[in-house]
Image (cartoon, grey):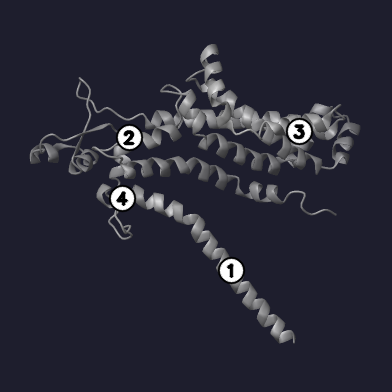
Amino acid sequence: MAVVSTRAGRIGNRLAIAAVIVITLIFLSPIYWITSTAFKPLLLSTTVPPTIVFEPQVTPFVKLFVKRAQLTAPVDQATFDAAPWWEQLVLAGGERLSRNGQGDVVYSAYPDRFVNSLIIAITSTLLAVSMGTITAYGFSRFRVKGEADLLFFILSTRMLPPIVVAIPMFLMYRAVGLNDTHLGLILLYTAFNVSFAVWLMKGFIDEIPREYEEAALVDGYTRMQAFFKIVLPEAATGIAATAVFCFITAWNEYAFALILTNRRAQTAPPFIPSQIGTGLQDWTVIAAGTVLFLLPVAIFTFLLRNHLLRGMSFGAIRK
């Protein structure tokens, strides 16, 4: 009987492993698809059935950073040979680089949009996590009159789909001069993320024993010193987990960035789909911009992976 149970257990483990592998492949398939498209020639990007085996090239990444126009006449061999290698890749695809009056190459706005995304996402994440942590500490450690109502009010800001208030926000921002500004998006993303940060951090801080702070207060620490030296280090895993989710939300936001920005403070999400090739949508360039856009989130999550894993299980086991 024990042998049968052991055999059944092994079969169950193998089935579970197979299920995990299949689910992982399903979740990773869009990543593979967009990454492979970023290295495909333009003619292979929309083939039916899809082209799986091909010779990778970096032409889409070159096109992403420069402005281009269609060639009106073939380029002579001498001009082609004298051009830099990256310009040759564009010329070979039937396009030429756009140049200004001085003959300098005109570069695309993607780097500026990428930097805008970094500035807005990082700043709003820092503000949301900071304010959320302090607010959550106050709710967790002090008796607040109407605490349940206040927490519900904070949570209710997440119940309304953000796109519903897009038009009122646009009119208000235009009236106060925050339209197409970094500050406008930072304030907006912070407001939407702070409620999430409060609720998530309150759960983490509730799990930190009050005795730690009481011991510190007895030893002569002030409440503020106890917060920074006792509570924050203990809540580091929760802060990391909250920061990852807030950063992803601000980094990927599309609707408000499209409506409330035009050029100066526009982030990468509205800019990437606007890449037009010679007479049609250049899906390889869009894929290249998307791959580069994925890297900061992947790196940020990877750097905080240990804190994130501990944060997701924090408080799950009670003694």
Residue 71: horizontal and vertical position, in percent?
A: 16, 35
* Separation of residues labelled 2 and 1 (CA atoms): 42 Å
- The label on residue 152 is 3
Answer yes or no: do the residues labelled 4 and 2 have beta carbons within 8 Å? no
Name above or below for residue 41 compared with residue 205: below
**Camera-nearest label, 2 or 1:** 1
Q: Nearer the viewer, residue 276 or 210?
A: 276
Q: Is residue 200 left or right of residue 163?
A: right
Disc 2 or 1, which lies upstream in sequence?
1
Name above or below for residue 20 compared with residue 13: above
* Separation of residues labelled 4 and 1 (CA atoms): 33 Å
SS class, disc 1: helix
Disc 3 or 2, which lies upstream in sequence?
2
* Residue drawn at 40 percent across, 32 percent down: 271
Residue 197: horizontal and vertical position, in percent?
A: 68, 35
Q: Is residue 122 left or right of residue 115?
A: right
Q: Which residue is mark 4?
A: 45
Q: Which residue is mark 2?
A: 65
Characterize the local packing of mark 1: few (<14), some (14-19) or many (20 or more) Cα atoms within 10 angstroms: few
